[in-house]
Image (cartoon, rainbow, N blue to C red):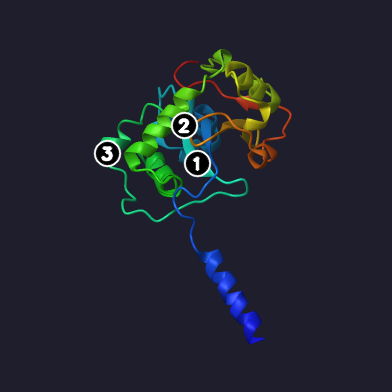
Amino acid sequence: MLKKAAIGCLFSFFAAVPASATDFDFYVLSLSWSPSYCAAEGASANRDQCGTNRPYAFVVHGLWPQNERGYPSDCNVQNPDVPRAISGTMLDIMPSRGLIRHQWRKHGSCSGLSQRDYFATTRRAYQRIRIPDHLRQLSDYKTVSPREVEQAFVEANPGLRSDAVAVDCDRRYMREVRICLTKDLQFRSCREVDARACRTSNLVMPPVRGRN
């Protein structure tokens, strides 16, 4: 009995140890269709992102360290706050300082990178992706299927396969496109991420604000 208890305590100890920074397999770049976020959140949406005449289209939700199963989060770091000098350089693709701060604390803290290097890597990952031309800016509501969006990204990005990209939805809205990348930002497959993709047949993409 004591031996079993000791083994149980030892297992609990190791299970409770937080993931170390850099202890992950690949990245997930999550691109959010900003008009869907604004429409779904309504009055509670972030004003910096969803205020009048905020013409954001696809923006970066985050760059997430990911494992083949699960992901690390909220790793211990000495600097949980992001200085304005750094967050200010990201506002063109991550339109909220609150979002930037949250992404660093939850995900960037587990990257093993400094804040400056993590956000520089986030920008490089964003620049690595070509947004399909017909999805760059919408002036009216568009009905799409997850497969249609995935295929559009595959066709626009040579080397990207369908098992490396997944569409996320919220009710009737197409919310995000998630693309899996190696640590050096090359496309790679990701079964768990792809398995959790949206299966709804028809989704809505609201128009970009200030352009309709």
Marks 2/3: CA distance? Answer: 18 Å
- Residue 54 is situated, as x and y percent measured from the top left of the image, at 41, 24
Element type at marker 2?
A: strand
Residue type at mark 3? Arg
At label 3, counting other C-alpha atoms closer than 10 Å, the crowd grade (few under 14, some 14-19, many 20 or more) is: few
Q: In what quadrant of the picture does the N terminus appear?
A: bottom right
**Camera-nearest residue between 8 and 107:** 8
- Mark 2 and mark 1 in contact? Answer it, CB < 8 Å: no
Residue 72 in sight here = yes
The residue to which callout 3 is attached is 84
User: Of label 2 and label 3, which has the lower sequence position?
Assistant: 2
| Numbered mark located on residue 60 in the image | 2
- Residue 155 is situated, as x and y percent measured from the top left of the image, at 63, 17
Q: Could you tell me which residue is drawn at 50 percent across and 32 percent down? A: 38
User: Of label 1 and label 3, which has the lower sequence position?
Assistant: 1
Q: Could you tell me which residue is drawn at 52 percent across and 17 percent down? A: 136
At label 1, counting other C-alpha atoms closer than 10 Å, the crowd grade (few under 14, some 14-19, many 20 or more) is: many
Q: Which numbered disc, 2 or 1, marks the residue closer to the eye?
A: 1
- Residue 61 is situated, as x and y percent measured from the top left of the image, at 48, 35
Element type at marker 1?
A: strand
Marks 2/1: CA distance? Answer: 11 Å
In this picture, residue 83 sits left or right of residue 196: left
Q: Which numbered disc, 1 or 3, marks the residue closer to the eye?
A: 1
